[in-house]
Amino acid sequence: MPDEITASRRANGCRQGTTFHADDGNVAAPNSAAKSGVLTFEVNGTSHKTSSNDLRARIDAELAALRENSQLRALDLPRGLNLCSNDYLGLASDPRLKQALLDAVFAASRIASTGSRLLSGNSRDWEEIESEFADFVSFDSALYFNSGYAANIGLLSSIAQPNDIIFSDALNHASLIDGIRLSHARKIIYPHRDMQFLENALHENASSPAAKIIVTESIFSMEGDIAPLENLANLTAAHHAFLIVDEAHALGVCGNEGCGLVAALPDRSRVLAAIYPCGKALASCGAFVAGSAALKEFLINHARSFIFSTANPPYIAHQIRAALALVRAAEDRRAHLREISLALRSALSAVGLHCGDGDTPIVPVILGSNESALRVAAELQSAGFAVKAIRPPTVPAGSARIRLSLTASISLDDVHRLTHMLSSAASSAHITSSASLAHA
Ligand SMILES: Cc1ncc(COP(=O)(O)O)c(C=O)c1O
């Protein structure tokens, strides 16, 4: 088995679709490119040449290539019914949460943390919310990072070493991919949710003395499907491996009181850590890494994104605490979210659109080409739906899509209007069910 197995690979936010070559067509080492003075680079199969040492020319050329491939990203303001947020429970505009934040700001002795947690930035607020959160998700301890991205790169880069092996789902989030890269561990990327492939890979490496770590999301952010967590837990136990699960899209949405999917696993003995970003259903920011007390102590000493970064302001701890109380009590919102998610999926299937295998509030409408996704997104936007076309390298080539993410503040009527618009936008873009399925 090769050291690195790349199944349909995704690199959210990275330039993984771009490779650089020297004039001779080999992948450019910096020196060979500098010698020849010309750099050829590819963006998803299209070849471009530019001067290797003129950074401005290189930037322009890369932007032109992205534009040519309908891959250029741009910032804009979401307008209309928001179908591209991760605010699953609709708490981001909840007046109770706003009030809790205002109260915390006024009660605070300082509104900035003033330093890293290891210097002046620690406070009782952070320590208390870490304990409360650990109890909520049934772990011994939790450590708060300033973002989910910081949590994932801090955890993975410190816990794994170059001789270890990380088995990573092909559709894992970019923050997990980047953390794995920073660890310099050997990586084996298994095709999305393919347990047979994973089991074979574990078998093939059975005699290796390396530490083995399986890394997955519980609900996948672009597919909206769920990892086979029980199988993964069983495989880790059978192969003396460890499991790390990113619960970004399950927190608040699934599990008892919204505690995610890991807490309910019958055997959690090999779960090393779970990551809980707070910027989604929790309508806050930052992320907890939950695990043992020893893991927390280890991260405080080794996770560079924790150590070398100014802590978030202490009032955020109060926002998270208030959000947690709302999330735990939000059973009706979770039920409504399930209802509209199922209604949307079945309505889209009925009009012949392919929306993956999941049953979560993340509903990917897979359209195939970048152009189709952009065209359909533009039509929906002009009809008052805030949606985004998601294109490679964020998703595998040929699976450009509209990623609909529902929130509990959306009504069944909204879902019906949306289905109607999507169906007519897709047919005016000549997208048939077989065309979208062929790319899925
Ligand atoms: C699965 C997953 N993990 C981690 C992150 C990063 O979290 P944050 O946005 O807090 O950096 C995200 C969000 O983009 C995500 O979808």
Image: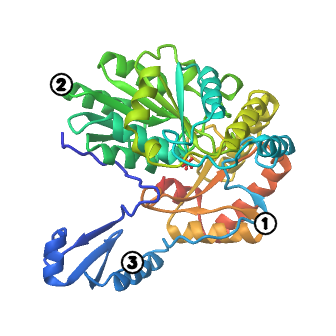
Distance between the Cα atoms at labels 1 and 2? 56 Å
- The picture places residue 215, in percent across and down from the top left corner, at 40, 35
Q: Residue 58 appears in which quarter of the rendering?
A: bottom left
For image coordinates 62% across by 62% down, the residue present is 388
The residue wearing badge 3 is 62
Q: Are marks 3 and 2 in contact (CB under 8 Å)?
A: no
Mark 3 sits near ligand 1, with its Cβ under 8 Å away: no
Tell me the mark number nearer the camera, choosing from 1 and 3.
3
Horizontal side, residue 200 vs residue 74: left or right: left
**Residue 12 or 142: which is nearer the viewer?**
142
Q: Residue 191 appears in which quarter of the rendering?
A: top left
**Residue 164 or 440: which is nearer the viewer?**
164
For image coordinates 18% across by 77% down, the residue present is 33
**Coloring basis for residues:** rainbow
- Mark 1 is surrounded, within 10 Å at the Cα level, by few (under 14), some (14 to 19) or many (20 or more) other residues, namely some
- Disc 2 residue type (three-letter): Pro
